[in-house]
Amino acid sequence: MSRESGFQASFIRHLRELFPDAIILKNDANYLQGVPDILVLIGPRWCAFECKMRPTSPQEANQGYYVTLMNEMSFATFVWPGNEKDILDELQRAFKPRRAARVSQSQ
């Protein structure tokens, strides 16, 4: 197992812990070159992640393009061990369940 695939597996475990009802899909890099590694469906929302071992790790062709495009659609980013906690915190804030508006009852 490569170090990146080990980090990816660990990241997926953390996503499952935070979002137990989410559907987490691992994308096939051979199907669409550059599409992020992981797609997460959380209720009506979604996000995508490209896993790297460090921020300076080389990008494959089209990875930057797809991360930018998908981030404009919803939420997508590069993630590595050094920013994982910040990314998961941001994701929890962005995708927290929305409360229904409270309507006061008039007497």
Image: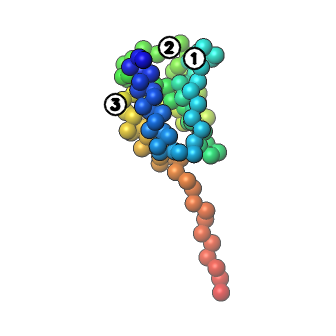
Q: Nearer the viewer, residue 18 or 45?
A: 18
Image quadrant of residue 101? bottom right
Residue at 49% from the left image edge and 25% from the top image edge = 50
Residue 103 shows up from this direction: yes
Q: Nearer the viewer, mark 1 or mark 2?
A: 1
Three-letter code, disc 3 = Gly
Q: Are marks 1 and 2 in contact (CB under 8 Å)?
A: yes
Name which quarter of the figure residue 69 lies in. top right
Q: Which one is earlier in the sequence, the residue at label 1 or at label 2?
A: 1
Left of 100 or right of it: where is 78?
A: left
How far is the residue under mark 1 from the one under mark 2? 10 Å
**Amino acid type of the residue that numbered disc 1 sits on in the rendered structure:** Ala
How far, Cα to Cα, is label 1 from label 3? 23 Å
Q: With respect to residue 29, does 23 lie above or below?
A: below
Q: Is residue 45 above or below residue 72?
A: below
Residue ID for mark 1: 29
Residue 33 x, y percent position in the rendering = 59, 15
The amino acid type of the residue labelled 2 equals Glu
Q: Quadrant of the N terminus?
A: top left
Upstream in sequence: badge 2 or badge 3: 2
